[in-house]
Amino acid sequence: MRVIIVKDYEEMSRKAAKIVSDRLHRKLDLVLGLSTGSTSVGMYQELIKAHKEKGLNFSKVRTFNLDEYCGLSPDHPQSYHYFMWYNLFNHINIKPENVYIPRGEVENAEAFCNWYEQKIKEEGGIDLQILGIGRDGHIGFNEPGSSLGSRTRIKTLTEETVEDNSRFFERKEDVPRYAITMGLGTISEARECLLLASGANKAEAVKRCIEGPVSAETTASLLQLHPKVIIVVDEEAAKNLKRKDYYRYAERMAEKLEVR
Ligand code: GLP
């Protein structure tokens, strides 16, 4: 697990976008797992900039989003479909047929979830999965208590998550209570994971994710078992980490070695 501590949200966004573009330069037909939420917006802006100014090419990229609210249509302004087109896809040269986002309105959710899992496999599996983290330590919408081996399915959101996400809705009552999310087993199969966190309200979740026990209580802690994880956190989000100095030192040493 590589932990990179940066100054603030802007630096986190630039660092994350650099990692994504490096991977994309190495593999044009990269399969990206994508996240929504305010944490990833800055990184998407940096990627748009790299596309417009440096010709970063998304024409062969395939993307799979982590999750979507149940009951929201793709054109609902708070749906994750809308979020992705508004914040990224409309501004880069990705082919619409290469974009996969769970559908919030489906007749047969189980069949849809199986199809989604199958599609990820058919496209060769996810090369790089981008993740944010909820205040309760969730990744995707895998709330505390989720099975560590779970696959794409419907989850009931916790009160805390509904509360946190209500800032995007007019009224708290409008926040959906269910979501379709990739499971923890699904996320674990990505070849590489990149988790981002910014701000003091994420500090406790970040600490439990990196330095706590691996437990379904903090589903992000599952990343400790993954062979290739990069975590980019700003100072505020890193403030509770016990081994902060070591992570900084290790990054400096790695730069000297030029191993990454
Ligand atoms: C939601 C999403 C997560 C995201 C989290 C944090 O719960 N399902 O994927 O990581 O929100 O969101 P934010 O970045 O807005 O804090």
Image (spheres, rainbow, N blue to C red):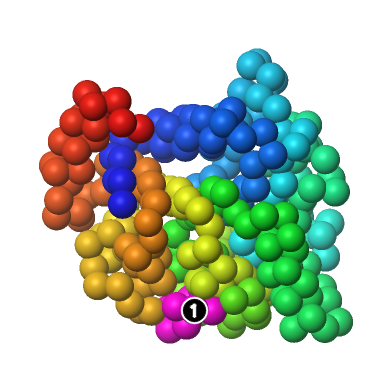
- Amino acid type indicated by mark 1: Gly
- Residue sitting at the far top: 53
**Secondary structure mostly taken by the magenta-highlighted segment of the chain:** loop
Residue 212: give x, y in percent of width and height. 24, 68
| Residue visible at 69% across and 61% down in the picture | 120
Q: Is residue 177 above or below residue 120?
A: below
Residue 87: name its quadrant: top right
Work out whether residue 31 or residue 106 is closer to the camera in this orientation and state it: 31
**Residue count near mark 1 (Cα–Cα under 10 Å), binned few <14, some 14–19, many ≥20:** few
Residue 249: give x, y in percent of width and height. 15, 36
| Residue visible at 38% across and 79% down in the picture | 216
In the image: residue 3, left or right of residue 243: right
Q: Which residues are magenta?
A: 142-150
| Residue visible at 28% across and 40% down in the picture | 5
Q: What residue would you read off at disc 1?
A: 149
Asked whether residue 7 is drawn in magenta, I would say: no
Q: Is residue 194 above or below residue 206?
A: above
| Residue visible at 72% across and 75% down in the picture | 113
The answer to whether residue 70 is visible is no
Residue 230: give x, y in percent of width and height. 38, 47
Residue 245: name its quadrant: top left
Residue 106: give x, y in percent of width and height. 83, 76
Q: Secondary structure at mark 1?
A: loop
Quadrant placement of the C terminus: top left
In the image: residue 101, left or right of residue 194: right
In the image: residue 192, left or right of residue 237: right
The answer to whether residue 132 is visible is yes
